[in-house]
Image (tube, helix red, strand yellow):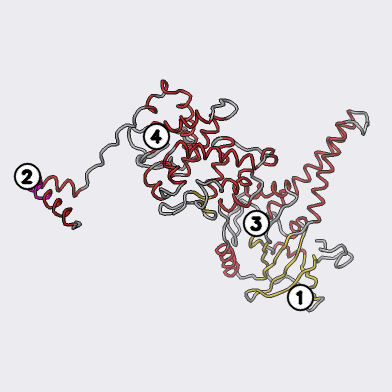
Amino acid sequence: MTSTTSAPVVAGITTEEQTYATRYKQGGRTVFALTLSPAELINMVAQPNPSIPNPGNRAIRENHAKAFANYYLNHESWVIPGIILRAPSIFTFTADHDNGWGVLSYPRRSAANIQILDGQHRILGFHLAQALIQQRIEKARDQRNRAMRVENGNKNSAAVREAEAALRAAERLLDRFSSERVSVEIQVTDDTTIYRQMFFDIADNQLGITASVRARFDTRKVANRALELVLEHPLLASRVDLENDRISRHSPLYASARHVSDVIRAVQVGLDGRIGKAMERTANERQVAEDAKKFLDVAVEAFPQLAALQVGQVSPKALRETGLLGSPAMLRVLGGVYFHLAGEKRHWSRDQIVAYFKTLDPHMAGGAYPGSIWMRIESVNQQGVKQKAFTEGAFAPNGLRQSLVAVETALVDWALLGKKGAPFLWAKPAPRPEPEPTEDEVALAAEIEADPDLEQLLADNAAFNKKTGVTS
């Protein structure tokens, strides 16, 4: 392994691997801190094999490692936390200064003893990234050689210049791989019980990042960049949880930041659409935010319950308990419907969309029930089996993505069919079925049937209690 400085630690041929490090104590253990390039790191630690369990770590998800490799290759401003390794006492340390700085050595034959404590997906990702870089270099060289043959050695031809540019780009990646640095800790322990506990302590004390926090800080997504501007809308102001993803039924807040980001995305591309990489980079977040705010204005105008929420006449909790508009998922669906109707394909005007949403308003009260328009909607799962998008009594579509898309599709289709094609939408909502009587109600009805005078006695008692203010 090469030194972490421009000069070698020890000249000549050696059976030892050497690098600069700092030695200190943590939790009673000896720890060595290093800064290694990705190339040096994968030279120190063997490539993890997802099919072979590591007794001191969790199972490896190969797709996660591939995603990290792509992140590293595609982002020059990449950043990762430090890697933590573990190893038994195979090291020799020669201190150069009183502050713990010095030269760390270990036998090459003992390198297999260096195992991963935290960072196995990142290390596998670096191994995969190196292979991809080498593939790109070889491919570019092959393209350049073939282009030179086809172009009779003309170095100024477009094909040769294109191959040369691809080769330079791949070689720049290789330079990054060998020059940039990663913080690495080596915890010295050979006790299985200790390093298992260390792994648990690391995982248990980490605070995972929620999708709501990611929505606020991941600026590569245009919906996230627009989020802060959309949060200023009076329907959402002070009613959005900026930290957590889920909103409890008793929460005084209406939605999470993740929910709002989903609404912004739905207004741009619908629920089944995708914002491509080019659009993520180039889209104007102010325009994206303005589009979302226009949708929210339409929703507030069309649905009196949302207007009441905006001015504080109804609480988010009360809205959740009385109708479908209390669900951020339903607002997201409406955002997708808005996109499909107002977009380039159909060009519905604002007034047309408001009028259509007003037609939906009577159907938003209460939950889904037999006979309601919501029980008409079905989605198809991955096995090709049809299922209802709403469960009976639900105040929102079920959480499956295909169910949300099915509701969006149905609402768009009904809008295009109009009153003649979808008369049930313009009709008065079907009456809600009477709830099944409780056991106490059934027992009381049987008593009244056996003693008709009991009904009058209960009525007299109720009238007396109401007059005197006594509660039962």
Q: Amino acid at mark 2?
A: Pro
Instruction: Estimate the spatial distance between the alpha carbons at disc 2 and disc 3, rounded to whole Å.
Output: 77 Å
Residue 410: % across, % down: 46, 30
Q: Which residue is mark 3?
A: 120
Q: Which residue is mark 4?
A: 374
Task: Describe residue 133's horizontal placement relative to residue 329 as left or right.
Answer: right
Mark 2 surroundings within 10 Å by alpha-carbon count, few (fewer than 14), some (14 through 19), many (20 or more): few
Q: In which quadrant is the C terminus drawn?
A: bottom left
Q: Which residues are magenta?
A: 452-458
Q: In which quadrant is the N terminus drawn?
A: bottom right
Q: Which residue is mark 1?
A: 100
Q: Secondary structure at mark 2?
A: loop
Instruction: Estimate the spatial distance between the alpha carbons at disc 1 and disc 2, rounded to whole Å.
Output: 94 Å
Mark 3 surroundings within 10 Å by alpha-carbon count, few (fewer than 14), some (14 through 19), many (20 or more): many
Nearest the eye: 191 or 135: 135
Q: Secondary structure at mark 4?
A: helix
Mark found first going from the N terminus, 4 or 2 = 4
Mark found first going from the N terminus, 1 or 2 = 1
Instruction: Estimate the spatial distance between the alpha carbons at disc 3 and disc 4, rounded to whole Å.
Output: 46 Å
Mark found first going from the N terminus, 1 or 4 = 1
Residue 452: numbered disc: 2
Residue 84: quarter of image: bottom right
Which of discs 2 and 3 lies nearer the camera? The answer is 2
Residue 391: quarter of image: top left
Q: Is residue 270 above or below residue 238?
A: above
Instruction: Estimate the spatial distance between the alpha carbons at disc 1 and disc 4, rounded to whole Å.
Output: 69 Å
Q: Amino acid at mark 4?
A: Trp
Task: Describe residue 228's horizontal placement relative to residue 23 as left or right.
Answer: left
Q: Secondary structure at mark 3?
A: helix
Task: Describe residue 366's horizontal placement relative to residue 99 as left or right.
Answer: left
Which of discs 1 and 4 lies nearer the camera? The answer is 4
Which of discs 4 and 2 lies nearer the camera? The answer is 2
